Image (cartoon, coloured by chain):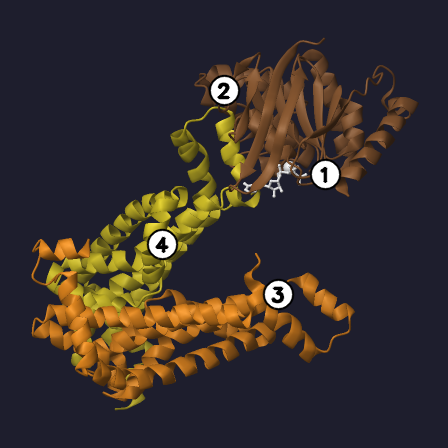
Chain colours: A orange, B brown, C yellow
Amino acid sequence: MWELAGRADISIAFPPFSKVAVAFVSMLFNGEFTAAYADSLPPLLIGLCITIIGGVIIGVSIGLVRSTEWFIMPLLIIFQTAPVSALIPMLTYIYGISDTAKVVAIVILGMPLVALNSYKGIQATSPSLLEMAKSFRASWFDTILFVILPSAQKMIFAGLRLGVSGAFIGIVLAELLITPTGIGDLITYNRFVAHYDKMFATIVSILAVAGLTLGGMSKLEDLLFPSEKNE
Amino acid sequence: MDDIILKTEDVGVIYDRSIVALENVSLNVPTGKLTAILGPSGCGKTTLLKVIAGLIEPSSGTVKIRDKETIGPGPDRALVFQDFALLPWATVLQNVAFGLRAQGVSKREREKTSLTYIKEVGLSGFEDKYPHQLSGGMRQRTGLARALTVNSEILLMDEPFSAVDEQMRRKLQEDLLELLKIENKTVIFVTHSIEEAVYLADQVVILSGRPGSIAEIVYPEIDRLGEIDLIRRQPRYVELVDEIWSSLKSYVE
Amino acid sequence: MGWMTLLPPLSGIWFAFAELLEQTAFWEAFAMTARTFGIGLGLSILVGIPVGVLMGISTRADKILSIWVNLFISAPITAVIPALMPIFGIADATVIATVILFSIWVVIIDTQAGITHVKDSLVEMGRNFGCSRWKIIIWIVIPAALPEIITGVRLSVVRAVKGVIVGQIVIALIGFGGLFNTYLSYFLMERFWALIIVVFVMSFTIIGLVELLERRIAFYARTR
Ligand SMILES: Nc1ncnc2c1ncn2[C@@H]1O[C@H](COP(=O)(O)OP(=O)(O)OP(=O)(O)O)[C@@H](O)[C@H]1O
Ligand SMILES: [Mg+2]
């Protein structure tokens, strides 16, 4: 379908699929992708680590220690529903053109989702399970480790997937808007010089990387927790 | 010999090309009588009922009504569902009127008919309630009224009373018998309760375990005139329950 | 650069807010945002629900479409916006396309989930009373899936809000995106924050309204 639309000359900005595929393969081997991803991946990985670890810790701790709930929850909800991306352009003015800006963009867009889902997962631990743990005189530590966390695991993983897709949006936005480097720059540059086949190839590569990452996470979850299949 | 309203001839059902759920089921259902289908779990009771209802096409064999082959659901058969199958967004009245609405009966007329049956099943005053405001027993009465309004000769019920508690179940059983004195219906119902089958049915069909086929047919011929509690103490009743229990046990093993 | 310039005092923001409301540029951006948001979201819902229904009732459609829907629902759509610009121009159409790409997938997926979770017995009930396929879909299946469909619509509103802002920001020349860009380049931090607050408040109002609507319909779900 894409091929037909492209061939039908709807717009020169919409190249046929075959051209994009050719561009994709050539960019893969002439080092353009390698160079761009070498710029983008390190901040993405750092940002992802902070997002995941920080998000789970924040979510789990406010789920367990209720006293901070009233303060952090509204913030998380704001960050989840509001178009926080409006804040991204401002990051340049704080961090300048640097990897830090990218990392912060990733964390802002990804972490609240992870935290909120972890929190919800902890909250949703069924009361009867908790009572069961209590009746067996399980220690506080054991209850968390063997009852609450496993039962929240599904939600937490769902949150991780949301967080990772948020992180991808963060890095793309940051690279499109503030730091003309990496994969975002590859898109912008090819648009300016009207190499639309290369631009599409780059976009497809990002979608593929994101898709593979998320798919890999689902697989990993199935591998780590195979018993959770039933529902 | 009784007048036969419905019969299945050599009905077989195979799911997914490999699971044989029913095999060679030939069954005669006499007009105006209650037929119970009894059998171990998973033996194909629901499947048989759905074949009769026309919801499942048998892989082999036919279903005949008054000696005419039927295909698909028809207005001569109405189903009462185990899980009630009520529309949660519709009131009791709208739910009961659903069958008539599907037939294109005008609103005024279908509401009039529905109200008489709502009264008959003892739900007067609840016409405008929603299903979630009703008890399990009342929900099943709604399902029963819905099946009655379309005025079909044959009522099909799949474990109609299994989702309500024991007291309610007995009450519903008695009310069903009362109702059938007024309404001249042929009833085929699935149950896993031997007592229910013996207490209600004129004919109890016992299916063997998978693949389901008819193992035995028992005719309780209980004297249902006297007091209900006395019926359950009749020697004939107790004997039948024991007899069916022991033959069922052999199929489970 | 000090934090003071980046985070101006509230009184300053309030003052800038009052100023903002007097500007035609603001109201033009507002109108454009509302327009593109409305059209994009409307199209998402109008197209998404039928597609979801189709995927719910036809395994063929599900097989063909579900890979794409599942890919795009969590894909970084932001990366696609630069490709939309040369196709649709620096105008409404690009923003509308962004809004659609952000919001349509969740409508489709939730509608489909709702349709496939409708209890078999309800459909059998319809068939038993002689309903045609169409009547079953319209009288039984769609109303029964309504709670999920509404949830999908609510989530798509949240995503559409993000899409309309992200789209404008990436284009950076029109609507609120243009204003953000201008304010930041001239260090008008009060105005920047005033605009952020306006945008946030608008989002919450819209999302709040949809949640209210959802709660009204939620009672269906209770008995299922
Ligand atoms: N749609 C289906 N696809 C495949 N197999 C099915 C399907 N429906 C039923 N079966 C199988 O056919 C057999 C008979 O099922 P059926 O529901 O008719 O049994 P049943 O006697 O009503 O059981 P129960 O007492 O548990 O209600 C079972 O082994 C079941 O697993
Ligand atoms: Mg059954």
In the drawing, does residue A87 fall left or right of residue B8?
A: left
Label 3 sits on a secondary structure element that is loop
Where is residue A100 shown, x and y percent of the image? 31, 87
Distance Cα–Cα, label 4 vs label 1 = 40 Å
Crowding at mark 4 (Cα within 10 Å: few <14, some 14-19, many 20+): some
Query: Residue C169 placed where, x, y %?
Result: 21, 69
Any mark on residue A125, and which?
3
Q: Which is in the foreground here, disc 3 or disc 4?
A: 4
Q: Chain of mark 4?
A: C
Please state which of the two labelled residues, at mark 4 or mark 2, is closer to the viewer. 4
**Residues tagged by mark 2 and mark 1 found on one chain of the structure:** yes
Q: CA distance from mark 3 to mark 4?
A: 31 Å
Labels 3 and 2 within one chain? no
Determine which residue is flagged by label 1: B40
Indicate the chain on which mark 3 is placed.
Answer: A
1 or 3: mark nearer the eye: 1
What amino acid is at disc 3? Thr
Q: Is residue C5 above or below residue C109?
A: below
Q: CA distance from mark 4 to mark 2?
A: 38 Å
Residue under the point 58% across and 27% down: B11
